[in-house]
Image (tube, helix red, strand yellow):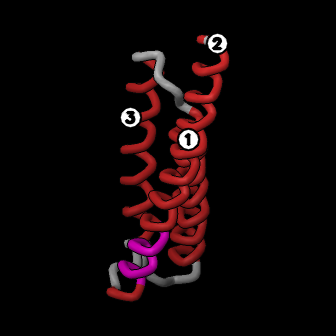
Amino acid sequence: MCELMAIAAAIVFTAGFFSAKRRDAPTGALFTTMLMFWGAALMWGVDCVANAIAGEGLLDLSWKDAKLGAIVVAAGVLVFAVLFAVERCRCRRIDDALRN
């Protein structure tokens, strides 16, 4: 379940990144978070394949795995919020310096 959640979050942040890039909006926080979720999806993808080779099921759809996925997505969104706030402050500071 955490694999599916990480893939979904990666797709959402990838769409947000390309949308912001098209509008010439700051994309640093989106890009970093997108890469984090794609890294998590890749890591869990390798884990799923290793489990399947070992004879277990391809995906773990248990509640424990769903909780882990929710925690990872929540942590990723929190990291995005912090990075976005820092990026926003830097942009304001640069805009203020250019106006003066």
Residue drawn 50% across and 66% down?
A: 75
- The mark that comes first in sequence, 3 or 1, is 3
Q: Please name the amino acid that badge 1 sits on.
A: Ala
Magenta stretch: includes residue 14: no
Q: Please name the amino acid that badge 3 sits on.
A: Ala
Discs 2/1, front: 2
Judged from this view, the residue extending furthest toward the front is 100
- Quickly name the residue at label 3: 15
Residue drawn 51% across and 39% down?
A: 30
Q: Main secondary structure of the magenta part?
A: helix
Which element is circle 1 on?
A: helix
Disc 2: CA contacts within 10 A as few (<14), some (14-19) or many (>=20): few
Which element is circle 2 on?
A: loop
Distance of label 3 from label 2 (alpha carbons):
36 Å
| Callout 3–callout 1 Cβ contact below 8 Å | no
Q: Position of residue 90 (x, y in %)?
A: 63, 33
Residue drawn 53% across and 62% down?
A: 45
Instruction: Magenta stretch: give its range.
Output: 65-72
Q: Position of residue 21 (x, y in %)?
A: 47, 21
Disc assigned to residue 100: 2
Residue drawn 42% across and 72% down?
A: 69
Magenta stretch: includes residue 71: yes
Which element is circle 3 on?
A: helix
Q: Please name the amino acid that badge 2 sits on.
A: Asn
Write down the quadrant of residue 100 in the picture: top right
Distance of label 2 from label 1 (alpha carbons):
27 Å
- Quickly name the residue at label 1: 29
71 or 51, which lies in front? 71
26 or 91, which lies in front? 91
| Callout 2–callout 1 Cβ contact below 8 Å | no
Disc assigned to residue 40: none
